[in-house]
């Protein structure tokens, strides 16, 4: 397995790989990521994974600095899965002239010494799909999807994949990146991977490791709520507000002052393509949830197809 830490090294190795499927990640790999790798393998002979905790998609009060970075274990998992190329750059490789993590511009040390005046921020390209990025997560994580588009665009131009695989767990991200590739005529096939869950229903996520055992128990209510809505949909209910209310009620069931706190940011029923709110579900739709369990923010969703 080739492990590249620089853009030039990654590019020179990529040149000899032929048809390539790519799985971008922030590391702290779990079985969900490895499922993406399996799907990648079904689409191309060679598979590349990137491991990069991207500062520009984190907000000022988010977990960028404490985000887990178990790089040796991640590389071991990639090796075991037969990954051909891992791209694991430093923040300086990707943002040589600084970036705007945590809401404040950060410059390289030589820049701080005067090469770039603080009032001359780097001229970043902003890719935004406002109709898709302004809703759901976008309302709670300002600038998040601009950061995602920025880093994925850079990674696509460095890795030059033929196929890229993303998880439905981050449904809005998948939709935005699919549209980005279409809008910019990138010759990359975007493939979606269904959400992988633990046996108790909790969607696998790198952030699950923040949960204490009682918090994890409480977090199961998110999936229970989504399953309840899904069952109601299967029984023929098509009014979005009824499905949303069912999910909300199940998620909040058992909430009591002494228990682990679970605060819902949103439960929403949206059109699967436009991400606009729907009233009646007559074409594919998504019920999306974001909730904070203790200090950990989790997202999950189900796709409903009439
Ligand atoms: P992350 O490392 O969280 O940025 O995720 C990297 C990729 O893995 C994204 O495309 C995610 O949607 C995908 N992913 C994360 N968790 C899961 C999961 N439980 N099932 C399927 N895909 C996932």
Image (cartoon, grey):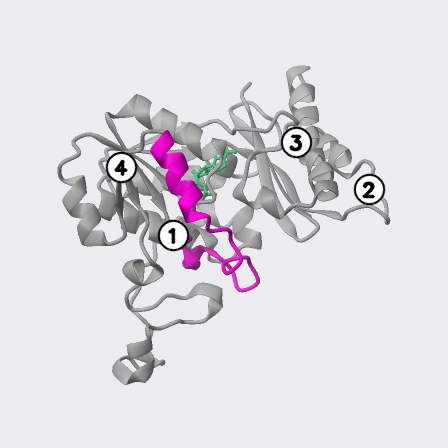
Name the secondary structure under disc 3: helix
Mark 3 nearby-residue class (10 Å; few <14, some 14–19, many ≥20): many
Closer to us: mark 2 or mark 4?
A: 4
Mark 1 nearby-residue class (10 Å; few <14, some 14–19, many ≥20): some
Q: Which mark is residue 128?
A: 1
Q: Left or right? Give the position of 189 relative to 305.
A: left
Above/below status of 117 relative to 263? below
The residue wearing badge 3 is 223
Is residue 60 located in the magenta-colored stretch of the structure? yes
Can you give x and y, in whole percent of width and height, for residue 276 in the image? Answer: 53, 39
Q: Left or right? Give the position of 50 relative to 172.
A: left
Looking at the rendering, which quadrant does residue 38 occupy? top left
Closer to us: mark 4 or mark 1?
A: 4
The residue wearing badge 4 is 1
**Mark 3 or 4 closer to N-term?**
4
The residue wearing badge 2 is 255
The C terminus lies in which quarter of the figure? top right
Looking at the rendering, which quadrant does residue 219 occupy? top right
Closer to us: mark 3 or mark 4?
A: 4
> Does the rendering let one see residue 248?
yes
Q: Which residues are magenta?
A: 53-80
Mark 4 to mark 1 CA distance (whole Å): 34 Å
Is residue 302 located in the magenta-colored stretch of the structure? no
């Amino acid at each position: 397995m080739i492990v590249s830490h620089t853009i030039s090294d990654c590019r020179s190795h990529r040149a000899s790989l032929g048809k390539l499927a790519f799985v971008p990640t922030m590391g702290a790999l779990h079985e969900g990521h490895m499922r993406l790798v399996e799907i990648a393998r079904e689409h191309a002979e060679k598979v590349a994974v990137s491991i990069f905790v991207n500062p520009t998609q984190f907000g000022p009060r988010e977990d960028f600095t404490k985000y887990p970075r178990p790089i040796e274990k991640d590389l071991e998992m990639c090796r075991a899965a037969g990954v051909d190329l891992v791209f694991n750059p430093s923040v300086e490789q990707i943002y040589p002239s600084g970036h705007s993590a945590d809401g404040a511009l950060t410059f390289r040390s030589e820049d701080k010494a005067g090469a770039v005046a603080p009032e001359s921020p780097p001229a970043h390209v902003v890719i935004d799909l406002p109709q898709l990025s302004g809703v759901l997560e976008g309302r709670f994580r300002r600038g998040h999807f601009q950061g995602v588009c920025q880093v994925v665009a850079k990674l696509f131009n460095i890795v030059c994949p033929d196929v890229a695989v993303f998880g439905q767990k981050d449904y809005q991200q998948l939709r935005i990146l699919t549209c980005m590739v279409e809008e910019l005529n990138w010759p990359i096939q975007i493939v979606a991977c269904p959400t992988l869950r633990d046996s108790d229903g909790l969607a696998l996520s790198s952030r699950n490791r923040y949960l204490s055992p009682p918090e994890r128990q409480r977090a199961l209510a998110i999936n229970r709520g989504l399953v309840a809505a899904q069952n109601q949909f299967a029984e023929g209910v098509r009014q979005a507000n009824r499905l949303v209310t069912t999910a909300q009620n199940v998620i909040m069931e058992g909430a009591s002052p002494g228990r682990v706190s679970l605060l819902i940011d949103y439960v929403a029923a949206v059109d699967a393509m436009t991400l606009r709110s729907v009233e009646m579900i007559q074409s594919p739709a998504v019920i999306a949830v974001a909730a904070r369990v203790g200090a950990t923010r989790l997202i999950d969703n189900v796709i409903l197809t009439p």
